[in-house]
Amino acid sequence: TMAFLFYADGGGPSGGAADGAPGRAERRAGGRPGAAGPPEPLVPFKDEETTSKRSPNKRMEEFGGVLVPPDNVAGEMGKPVVLPANLSADIKKLVDQGWMNNAFNQYASDLMSVHRSLPDPRDEWCKEEGRFLDAEQLPPTSVIICFHNEAWSVLLRTVHSVLDRSPKRLIQEVILVDDYSDMPHTKQQLEDYWKDQPKVKIVRAPQREGLIRARLLGAAHATAPVLTYLDSHCECAAGWLEPLLDRIARNSTTVVCPVIDVIDDTTMEFHYHDSTGVNVGGFDWNLQFNWHAVPEHEKKRHKNTAEPVWSPTMAGGLFSIDKAFFERLGTYDDGFDIWGGENLELSFKTWMCGGTLEIIPCSHVGHIFRKRSPYKWRTGVNVLRRNSVRLAEVWLDEYAKYYYQRIGNDKDNYGDVSRRKELRRNLGCKSFKWYLDNVYPELFIPGEAVASGEVRNLGYGGKTCLDSPARRSDLHKPVGLYPCHKQGGNQFWLFSKVGEIRRDESCLDYSGQDVILYPCHGSKGNQYWKYEEDTKLLRHGSSEKCLAINEAKNKLIMEKCNPDIQRLLWSLENYDK
Ligand code: LR7
Ligand code: MN
């Protein structure tokens, strides 16, 4: 579910499909701004644990089993680690290395305890007596954490947060799946660290499998009736597990995700979403995952904002699922390589094949959101596109074409999906139309558009197209221009029945300044465009001016309408009034 991976082969500012994706930072939906106030002087946690073979529970014992060390110890209570501005050259070098290797501030993490305390993010509703089944009635789970070259302190903190904040009985085991890491600390040092903790098992992939097959390898070793997946840079908050297992105990076809809180990549500050800030998962026709506010029809089902929320999709990394149900659904498509797409596959088939997907506001797990991927990827193959085409072929029915439009109808080689189609048939799953109508009615369906594809200017030989990745970060910014490339992606636009020029939820909008992208509001005005088929002018609703490009061909402008000037004329692909 990520954008930046493919710039290398997707090509520059206007490249292929993956470019339309929201950036990683944008996934911190609703993340709160950092806490204000002067930082206290910090004492680094003298943590032999991050470097030695100490018993993992030693630290707990030192605090009498209570995870509340002195307030000014780095990062405690989820507070930010703020490094002083005047670092020595040596330290600065370490900080830079940490960023380079991990794409987050490893140095800051290394200053914190691997058992650091967190604020309790739960709503009072969650703590009411009898809210969840008692631990004795809940099924135990195997927690599966896949990693490729995860930072030492971050990986340990992930595991400790599971062990420290879960009822013992409910953790059957923690399975660390090493996806062929080469950092030295992932070798013998990791085995030594956990040698007195029988619940932690280490499974090694014999070659780089990628996240998806690594998860399947973990599942193959799991012995509990419920699987819980986490990324390798998480921190589970108080009471995170019981509300998840509670839902599965009541109905084994319910797949559940915690609220994913934000651990800041720079300061390691833990920001939590309270239950009024919960988001649900969606996707766009680029098959990119995105977050949305809880829709009205869903809000109506609830008395309290902390109740489980139905979600059309999951982010992918953090969830619990009944093992038998996961197997019945055919786990993941093992033809998916490395990373991406698997979250939508599991989401679609959960809903379409008889299950329910929920976000559980009482369950909180923090995740370090990064702005780039630190890992090495296969070169020459667009992994994410291949995975997404497999997904579309098997699950999207007649809607697959909307994804293919977005990738310039270039499916490339996606391998054999006949077994996955057979799986769907055997399970007797519902149609994708059923899913859209019933589970994700808010999604804009491109079929209702009057034109789809490039928007080409006819001036200067007609080689210039509207071009924007239309990420959330592009909202409010001027829409770009780029030589037409016929590959869809950033040049794919829809001209909707109501006169919008849009991609997914972003609309071309003019209010007197630049022509920008703005969230579609559906009430015409500044987002209303009229295409005059005979003159080829694109006339703007509220201003009565026309869309044009400037003489340098690098900027969209609005001008007095005049069909004799080529710069003001446009062709819309697949125009069909
Ligand atoms: O080759 C690899 N092998 C691995 O084992 C590449 C990655 N990994 C591991 C890695 O160490 C990490 O634990 O896989 C996990 C996910 O990789 P990240 O953390 O680099 O990516 P991400 O956080 O952007 O991943 C999100 O999307 C992925 C692919 O679709 C997976 O579904 C991740 O689990 C998912 N993460 C989340 O859902 C957490 C919240 C982010 C959001 C939204
Ligand atoms: Mn992650």
Image (spheres, grey):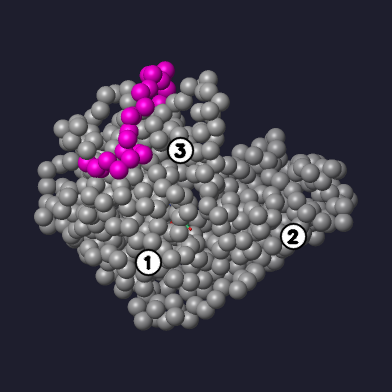
Q: Amino acid at mark 2?
A: His
In whole angstroms, how far apart are the C-alphas of marks 1 and 2?
A: 39 Å
Q: Is residue 270 above or below residue 561?
A: above
Foreground label between 1 and 3: 3
**At which x and y percent is residue 376?**
55, 55
Q: Who's the residue at 70% across and 35% down the image?
A: 513
Which quarter of the picture shows residue 311? Answer: bottom left
Q: Who's the residue at 76% across and 57% down the image?
A: 484
**At which x and y percent is residue 15?**
67, 56
* 115 or 309: nearer the viewer: 115
Q: Secondary structure at mark 1?
A: helix
Residue 290 inside the magenta-drawn segment: no
Structural crowding at the residue carrying mark 2, measured as other residues with C-alpha within 10 Å and reported as few (<14), some (14–19) or many (≥20): some
Residue marked by disc 1: 216
Q: Is residue 542 above or below residue 281?
A: above
* Residue 335 numbered mark, or none: none
**At which x and y percent is residue 425?**
40, 81
Q: Secondary structure at mark 3?
A: helix
**At which x and y percent is residue 186?**
40, 51
In the visual, does 221 lie left or right of 139? right
In whole angstroms, how far apart are the C-alphas of marks 1 and 3?
A: 28 Å
Could you tell me if residue 482 is visible in this image? yes
Q: Who's the residue at 18% across and 59% down the image?
A: 139
* 66 or 329: nearer the viewer: 66
Which span is picked out in magenta? Answer: 35-57
Residue marked by disc 3: 106
Q: Who's the residue at 30% across and 47% down the image?
A: 193
* Residue 485 numbered mark, or none: 2
